[in-house]
Image: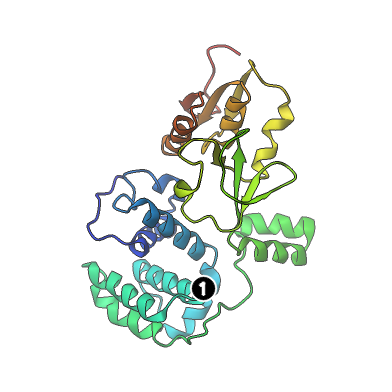
Amino acid sequence: MAQAKTAGLTARGGAVALLNAILGEGRLMSQLLSEDGPLAGLSGPERARAQRLTLAVLRAVEPVDRLLSPLLRRVPPLAAMNVLRLAVVELANGAAPHGVVNEAVGLMRAGRKTTHQAGLVNAVLRQLPPDLQLPGPAQRLPRWLRQPLVHTWGREAVSAMEAVFAVPPPLDLTLRQGAEAPEGHVLPTGSLRLAEAGQVSALPGYAAGGWWVQDAAAALAAPLLGAVAGQRVLDLCAAPGGKTLQLAAAGADVTALDISEPRLARLRENLSRTGLAAQVVAADALVWRPEAP
């Protein structure tokens, strides 16, 4: 659903809007990052910060809720709970308490439906210690995924996986030969890994289109096809498009198919930025058929 730009929107306000949609409506973050989504009123750096804050909260919802539970008589409405979650995550990551608490209260006062809960948010956050740390264990995987993993690998291994998932991942880039790129560590597979990237669009070489963001593991698939120059290749579930870009850069005639038009918008943006070409199709892979094999 399109949302109007909000005057005075901050990165924290944008993060709360994303959390409300993800945790309250079951929306996908990738679908919410379209131009007319909750972050539409933010500048590039603020959009990037809002996304980082949102992901930090999503990685720690369970530990944060365990910490907040003794301080709440009852669970408040989702908007207030998400403001509290965001503030706790920021405090646990060393943000200045005064600024965090003040903006959390300000976010509550800014909404007609939440202004009466500003006092609650203020009272809860001021009970937190200055050296705040989130309680363990790390957030668990969803039950439908965790159970088969435990059955296959055991509880200890799955707990170790969850501890890794709780840590913000590095940023991996796939590079075109000879392209300008930021400083980072080149992995044995050829991906460039950055420990702390910040705003992606501000990194060296972004505007020139010499690289794109792609997890190092995801970047392993396309090279397994070998020489693809001149061949027709179908990339199923293609968005956000890392493999499509790899294949196009290797000279393939690529059809990028995905059921989500909003997710394909990012793919089209990357094709335009890199100067690469692919046929982009928004359709269900279970029923779509190409004009030729």
Report which quarter residue 227 is drawn in: top right
Report which quarter residue 100 is drawn in: bottom left
Residue 131 rendering spot, x and y as whole percentages: 52, 85
Query: Quick one: SS at disc 1?
Result: loop
Q: Residue furthest top?
A: 292
User: Total label count?
Assistant: 1
Residue 36 rendering spot, x and y as whole percentages: 31, 44
Q: Residue furthest right?
A: 153
245 sits to left or right of 21? right
Residue at 32 percent of width and 73 percent of height: 103
175 sits to left or right of 148? left
| Residue at numbered disc 1 | 93
Residue 252 rendering spot, x and y as whole percentages: 61, 21
99 sits to left or right of 182? left
Q: Could you tell me if residue 28 is visible in this image?
A: no
Residue at 78 percent of width and 62 percent of height: 154
The amino acid on which the numbered mark 1 sits, given as a three-letter code, is Asn
Crowdedness near tag 1: few (<14), some (14–19) or many (≥20) residues, C-alpha within 10 Å: some
Viewer-side residue, 248 vs 234: 248
